[in-house]
Image (cartoon, rainbow, N blue to C red):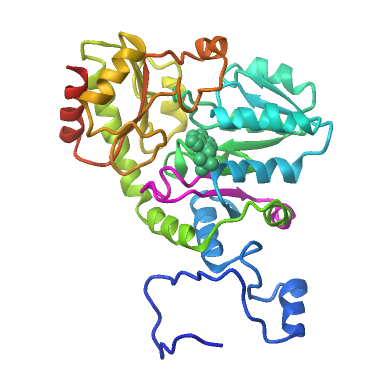
Amino acid sequence: MSHANLGKTDPLVAPIYQSSVYSIPDLDALDAIMNAGEPGYIYARDAHPNARRLASQLAQAESAAWGVVTGSGMAAISAIVLATLQKGQRVLASNRLYGRTVQLFTEELGRFDVATEYVDCNDLSAVEAALQKKPRLLFVETMSNPLVRVVDIGALAKMAHAHGALFVVDNTFATPVLMRPMELGADFVMESLTKMIAGHSDVTLGVVCGNDADMLPTINRTTSIWGLASNPFDCWLAERGLATLDLRMRAACQNAAALADWLGEQRGVSRVWYPSRPDHPDHALAARVLSGGFGHMLCFELEGGRDAVNRFIHAAPGIPFSPSLGHFTTTLSHPATTSHRYVSPAEKKRQGISDGLVRLSVGAEALEVIKAEMAKGLK
Ligand SMILES: Cc1ncc(COP(=O)(O)O)c(C=O)c1O
């Protein structure tokens, strides 16, 4: 059944196929779709046109052979671990990861007899030593949450492969504008599309990208069976966001670099974390491996701890306390009470996540607008 007669014309913008199920001409047509890979759709949890379109655009952006869109960034990580790990296998992960990822590895995978070891991925000899235990996966973030520590993706890919491990990269902070881990040997790259890629804080989605053709049906199957799939409207919005990713990302990176230097001169700010600055521990590495900027995320430390952060939030309402990232204007978060809330005090101390640490997701608005609001907060 056709719903619209468009003649010889096509809509410039792809329609939203807001349908959970499709009508199929007959049983033979069903077999052709399911067994012979003929084009067509059956049930949206398995596949739908908006997800397929978005996935192929994202795969191209990431230099990957394929992509599978999932219902969130966490669903993307879940799809990878569920598709690749067997009971009793091990995971080796960076010791600077988003808090929920750590919970997934330690608490959830732990229930399935999968042990995770955490290692400082900026210390390649420590990684080499940990790889001797033959983990199935090595998992890192290109730029870590929150202190934007940068790792050497190419070197880690080689080391993982030399020990028979799959190398998985969470590229959410960098986005394919700054880094394409597939080009440096990653087996899977995943993104939380919720952040910079969709870019307007109105979508929750993720993507898994890969090159191994055999893994595509496995990731698709896992996504359907475990119920990790996306919905059409979110995919449509994310496609619209992706179209301006490059512009937004480059503007935000420029703003972030200027703001980091400005913050470094302000009274009441004891430290700034941004990789363009020579005092960032990974400055030289970041300058070598990132292209087009040093990212839209930065952190600064306020003298006066939690109270100072609360005062800043009240005094600078134009920079909303909004614990996500990647919005088109600047937002603020407080890692100690949000993304890293469930991390132990000792671990927070090791990572440098103090009560006075503020994380900024810098937007693409005029720099002077951001600075004026920041100045109110710091006064
Ligand atoms: C680095 C990173 N990875 C993954 C995720 C999870 O993504 P989502 O919230 O889309 O599930 C987040 C969320 O904040 C994140 O910051």
Give the position of the N terminus as an image quadrant. bottom right
Q: Identify the residue shown where x is 27% and y is 41%.
A: 364
Percent x, y of residue 176: 46, 44
Residue in view at x 32 percent, y 46 percent? 248
Count of numbered marks: 0
Question: In the rendering, at what x and y percent does residue 85 appear?
Answer: 77, 39
Instruction: Please name the residue shown 66% across and 15% down the image.
Output: 125
Q: In which image quadrant can residue 123 be found?
A: top right
Quadrant (top left, top right, bottom left, bottom right) of the C terminus: top left
Determine whether 274 is above or below 244 in the image: above
Secondary structure, magenta segment, majority class: loop
251 sits left or right of 236 in the view: left
Is residue 194 on the magenta stretch? yes
Residue 211: horizontal and vertical position, in percent? 65, 51
Q: Nearer the viewer, residue 200 or 170?
A: 200
Q: Quadrant of residue 148?
A: top left
Residue 104 falls left or right of residue 319 = right
Does residue 240 show up magenta in the picture?
A: no
Residue at the spot x=37%, y=74% of the render?
12
Say above or below: 378 vs 258. Answer: above
Magenta residues, start to end = 191-217
Q: Position of residue 177 (x, y in %)?
A: 42, 44
Q: Nearer the viewer, residue 229 or 161?
A: 229
Q: Nearer the viewer, residue 56 or 159?
A: 56
